[in-house]
Amino acid sequence: MAHELTELEGHASFVFNEDRGWPWHRLGTPMAGFMTVRQALEAANCDDIVTLHRLWHDADGNPVGPELYEVVSDYYGPMGVAGSGYKVMQCSEIMDIAQRIVGMSDDTAIVDTMGRLGEFGERFFCHVEFPELVIDPHGIADKIRRGLFVGTSFDGSMANTIGLSNIREVCANTVRLSLGQLKQAISVKHTGNAEERIDQAAVAVGYAAAAETAMVEKAEAMLRVDGGPAFAIACDTLWPMPEDLPKQHKTRRANIIEQVATLYLDGETNSKLVGHNGWAVYGAITEWMDWQRPLKNLDGEAATLTRLDQTLLNVSHDVNDRKMQVADAILSLAA
């Protein structure tokens, strides 16, 4: 079936917040409003315990050479085979980690959807909605909505994965789509130190509560900077223009600045929404970096895909450093 939801005793192992609408497949357990993690785990049949069982013989009775283990759920039975280095990450464990790195407590209702995929429940997924970041709540009240994808697998088909997502995951196709578009993605293999590595990656990509607080403070400070000077200093920071700059480079610089100016003046999420200020300038700059930045020796679809990989999978550290340089330059005008 296209949805690939796991069935247990005739029912789909999937739960969803019906206040946000029914999924296209009309399957699963509807719940009134967002759920706590514990409520969702139980309703979606994801509170099972997965264990490893040593395999000594294959299905034909022949001795197994390398050290292999069968991955077994107390709800779904055998789900896959793993080597000696494999470490089970229970659904409840990866949800605990996700809660911790976004600063949510156990009794907070944050789960929108949760379920299992595959004939034997081999893959787990969850969509979490956590509180919006509100920039200048008593003024423009610019809201940054954040959804979080959480997933893992018990057959090696998906790493332990956490990342920001604006896709509501309700089936196999939406999970695949989400995995291709995650922002600030953390993807860690099923090894013994997986939890530690997820925590380290969470700090590196800015999931810590302190990083969120700092972001709000910086954004509200940028709101107090006039857009004209902010635009000028942002462009000078990214694209300085020494006197001996070749003509072709000056032309390229002018073209780029024109693109950014269009985003700043006409973009639906920039000055039209928050006014002519440093925060709108920063939004235009980062939008250009994420979606329009030219890539050497690439154009068209190849450039778009490469830029998408660098941005959404957070592998282009130079780009992120330059975003911080722009923010610091704009904030220098607020001092």
Image (tube, rainbow, N blue to C red):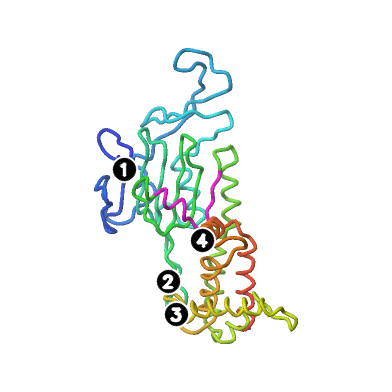
The residue most toward the right is: 244
Q: Residues within 10 Å of mark 2 (few under 14, many from 20)?
A: few
Residue type at mark 4?
A: Thr
Q: Earlier in the sequence, mark 3 or mark 1?
A: 1
Residue 2's tag is 1
Q: Is residue 41 left or right of residue 26?
A: right
Q: Which residue is rendered at x = 46% and y = 35% of the image?
A: 154
Work out how far the residue at label 3 is from the one at label 4, CA to CA, in angstroms.
22 Å
Q: Earlier in the sequence, mark 3 or mark 2?
A: 2
Residue tagged 4: 304
Q: Secondary structure at mark 3?
A: helix
Q: Earlier in the sequence, mark 4 or mark 2?
A: 2
Residue type at mark 2?
A: Lys
Residue tagged 2: 143
Asked if the residue under mark 2 is in contact with the one under mark 4, i.e. CB atoms within 8 Å, the reply is no
Q: Magenta segment, which residues?
A: 175-188
Q: Secondary structure at mark 1?
A: loop
Q: Position of residue 222 (x, y in %)?
A: 55, 79
Q: Secondary structure at mark 4?
A: helix
Quadrant that contains the N terminus: top left
